[in-house]
Image (cartoon, rainbow, N blue to C red):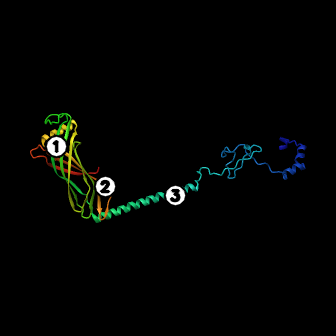
Amino acid sequence: MADRVHPVTINSDHYEDILSPSSLADRFHPTAPPAPFEPLSPSGRSDATGYSQATSNFQPLKAYTAPGYLSPPRPPPTVVGRPPLRSPAHKRGRNACFCCLIVFLSIFLLLVLAVGTAALVLWLVYHPKIPHYSVEDAQIIKLKVASGNDDSSNVGQPIQNPILNTDILLTIQAQNPNHKIGISYSQISIDGTYQGASVGQCNIPGFYQAVDNTTTLSARLNVTNSQLTGSQGTALQTDISNNDIGLLGRVDVKVGLKIGSWTTPHVWIHVECNIQVSPPTSPQGGKLLSKSCHWKWK
């Protein structure tokens, strides 16, 4: 039925070409395998160097190699998505720095622990106490404000170009309350001021104070023709007329604690005293009216 509807015309030459000995030999015994396919351009995973990253065994693409040109050395393989590994020398340097830091911190903590332990032992054995300082008495021999122009005081009137002349004798008491610790004084300085203006300064030689001892010190403060501001001169003139003058005394001492035959490094101790005195012209004479002393760390 098919031949009737679609007749087929067979060419005898076609059968002769198919059944020829050379054609059959090529079909059943190929002389050479087909050439492998090589892309003319690198894939999406290749780079501009002409090497394919599809496999770990990189091969140069012929499309990027000119005839007679030697390919450059093959780069080391890298893993996509992972940073390159650091050299062992870098790791050794980082480990050495970390070890040095640990050793330094350990030594520092040991030193702090040793110092703290020694301080605790000294505290428990000797019970150190802070020395006390106070102003016990004051004699106002001279306290006069005058004008620098005519050297005369005008009580109740503003003073032009005021100047100050003083002569004050202070009695200071230093007490060592420690039973097992002596005190070594290297420097003692005493200053007196009125509203910031100096009324005198005195230095006392150093000495050693034994345990459970109270030492009385004398300091003489005096100034001659010390310049005052107009407000200071007016305020001092008013206080003299009221027979009540407020002075500020400051005691600076450099002390060291002596424990047995060992003396600690000397440190500064500062004490401020607010004292009220009367002038020599008052009915009761120039003397101490009140006092109040406290520690100052600077």
Mark 3 to mark 2: distance in Å? 41 Å
Helix, strand or loop at mark 1: strand
**CB contact under 8 Å: marks 1 and 3:** no
In-front residue for pair 9/14 = 14
Asked whether, in this view, residue 82 is left or right of residue 24, the answer is: left
Which is nearer the eye, 187 or 75?
187
Q: Please give the residue where the numbered disc 2 appears in the rendered image.
A: 267
| Image position, residue 204 (x, y; %) | 24, 53
Q: Earlier in the sequence, mark 1 or mark 2?
A: 1
Could you say whether the residue bearing mark 3 is in a helix, strand or loop? helix
Q: 24 above or below 125?
A: above
Q: Front-most of 167 and 254?
A: 167
Q: Nearer the viewer, mark 3 or mark 2?
A: 2
Locate residue 7: give its quadrant: top right
- Residue 134 image position (x, y, % from top left): 20, 53
Answer whether residue 191 is visible to the viewer in this image. no
Give x and y (percent) for residue 268. 29, 53
| Residue of label 1 | 143
**Left or right: where 245 falls relative to 82:** left
Residue name at image x 90 percent, y 46 percent: 16
Residue 79's spot in the image, x, y percent? Answer: 62, 51
Q: Can residue 125 be seen in this snapshot?
A: yes
Tag 2 secondary structure:
strand
Q: Amino acid at mark 2?
A: Val
Q: Tags 1 and 2 in contact by the CB under 8 Å rule?
A: no
Q: Nearer the viewer, mark 1 or mark 2?
A: 1
Give the crowd class for mark 1: few <14, some 14-19, many >=20 residues within 10 Å.
Answer: many
> CA gap, disc 1 to disc 3?
72 Å
Residue shown at 29% from the left, 61% from the top: 258
**Dot 3: within a 10 Å radius of its alpha carbon, few (fewer than 14), some, or many (20 or more) residues?**
few
Q: Residue at x 55, y 57 (%)?
A: 92
**On the image, numbered disc 3 is attached to which residue?**
96
